[in-house]
Image (spheres, rainbow, N blue to C red):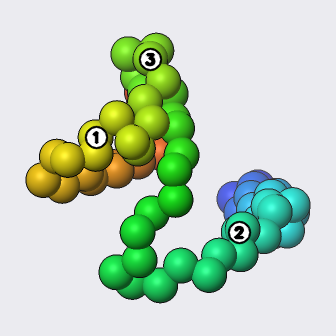
Amino acid sequence: MRLFASLLLLVVLSVVAMAQQPAPPKTHLKVGDKAPEFSLRATDGKAYKLSDFKGKKNVVLAIYVLAFTGG
């Protein structure tokens, strides 16, 4: 019975958490379009702009949401 109650609580909390997430931003970008200018803070603490890499062959943006969380 405790297992069922725990699972039910987990499901309820998951549904509530998913309902509170904001909608993704709308964009008019299509595959092959140039990316708009943006900047992000990296794990080294520095902020990098997309334009910093202009003239390089390729830019890959990799986001691993569980990095350094132990998950």
Number of numbered discs: 3
Vertical relation: 46 (above or below) 13: above
Q: Is residue 51 visible?
A: yes
Secondary structure at badge 1 equals: helix
The spot of residue 57 in percent (x, y) is 12, 53
Q: Amino acid at mark 3?
A: Lys
Q: Is residue 12 visible?
A: no
Q: Residues within 10 Å of mark 1 (few under 14, many from 20)?
A: few
Dot 2: within a 10 Å radius of its alpha carbon, few (fewer than 14), some, or many (20 or more) residues? few
Q: Is residue 53 left or right of residue 57?
A: right
The answer to whether residue 37 is left or right of residue 58 is right
Q: Nearer the viewer, residue 19 or 56?
A: 56
The residue under label 3 is: 46
Q: Could you say where residue 37 lies in the image, as x and y percent from the top left? A: 51, 50
Q: Tell me which corner region of the image, top left, top right, bottom left or bottom right, holds residue 34.
A: bottom left
Q: Residue furthest left?
A: 57
Q: Earlier in the sequence, mark 1 or mark 2?
A: 2
Alpha carbon of mark 3 to alpha carbon of mark 2: how far? 26 Å
Q: Amino acid at mark 2?
A: Pro
**What residue would you read off at disc 2?**
24
Q: CA distance from mark 1 to mark 3?
A: 14 Å
Residue 65 x %, y %: 48, 45
